[in-house]
Image (tube, grey):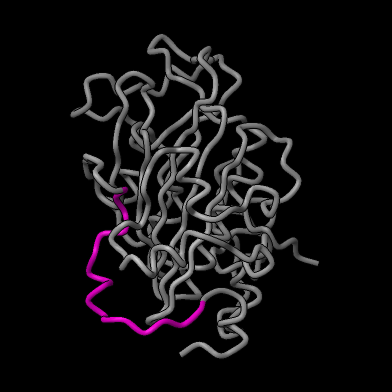
Amino acid sequence: MINKNTLHYLILLFTFPISVFAQNYLVPRNQAYQKRAGYNFSYNQGTKVCNWLSYKLNSSDVTGSEVLNKVFYKDSLIKVCPSEDMYDGYAYVKGQFKPRSASRNSVNEMNEVNNMLNVVPMDIGFSKGHWRILDNMISGWAVTFDSVFVIKGPIYEKKAVETVGSGKISVPHKFFTVVLVKNGLDLGAIGFVLTNNNDLKNLKQCAMPIDSVELLTGYDFFSELPEYLETFVEESIDPNIWKDKSVSYKLKSKYIKKYQCVAVEKSGKRCETETFCVTRNCWKHGCDIRSK
């Protein structure tokens, strides 16, 4: 059970049938999709980037012990799937929709995270900065609460789109992320739209209600919620309760433990920095709490 202070942070209580949670919150309404281990996706053969990619998180996905795999590979079932070498020589890194830190409970899911279907051209500062902070914040919610449903994708705003590689992989101007958090019968949702550069100062600047993200993308998210709940979840947010400081640090003190960082340095050795972040990354490797 969560206490009143926790409820203030995140979610309002509603009473409705538990069968609601058997629905699929990971696919926007009327969207065809495919599956790989650990995520659903809609692939765009024109942009060579997923239209959207979605996954569900719980505590074991974040705190599992599966070794991080850094070997990327081309999906054999997608004819126009990019290859890793298409990024060579370009000013963009291989950003990931689903992070490795969200796949620590399954060797198959860890392998699929490095499928080039899950990769998208990202500004290097953005990838190592607020995109990673957002991923770690979401992972903190997965540890603190029952489950988290995440849908991410690119936004292209201009007719002239920059491309990378011989496969002409389209570089997104922005990215969207929508998150639905479930804890018992409690629900909460928030959206983010982030520009693909390193100019952002804090995540609160790009937080917004789900319906605002829907207007920008044309997708209908979490449509299998009962209509009255979907309306509530989408129409407003209180940015102050979705802190861009690790929620895991603020909520449920039993999770506040010290770990050795799980990240691997360029030398190949495991990082020796200690961290209180539930995702077991230190501040240098993605946790948004800098140790004092």
On screen, residue 51 versus residue 281, left or right, reads: left
Residue ID at (38%, 28%): 49
Residue 211, percent across and down? 48, 51
Residue ID at (56%, 74%): 10
Residue 159, percent across and down? 51, 14
On screen, residue 116 versus residue 243, left or right, reads: left
Task: Name the one closer to the observer, 273 or 116.
Answer: 116
Say if the magenta span includes residue 281: no
* Residue numbers of the magenta segment: 12-28
On screen, residue 245 versus residue 85, left or right, reads: right
Residue 99, percent across and down? 46, 48
* Residue 269 drawn above or below residue 79: below
Residue 162, percent across and down? 53, 15
Task: Name the one closer to the observer, 97 or 100.
Answer: 97
Residue farthest along the left direction in this orientation: 77
* Rendered-image quadrant of the C terminus: bottom right
On screen, residue 210 versus residue 130, left or right, reads: left
Residue ID at (36%, 43%): 53
Residue farthest along the right direction in this orientation: 292
* Residue 133 drawn above or below residue 153: below
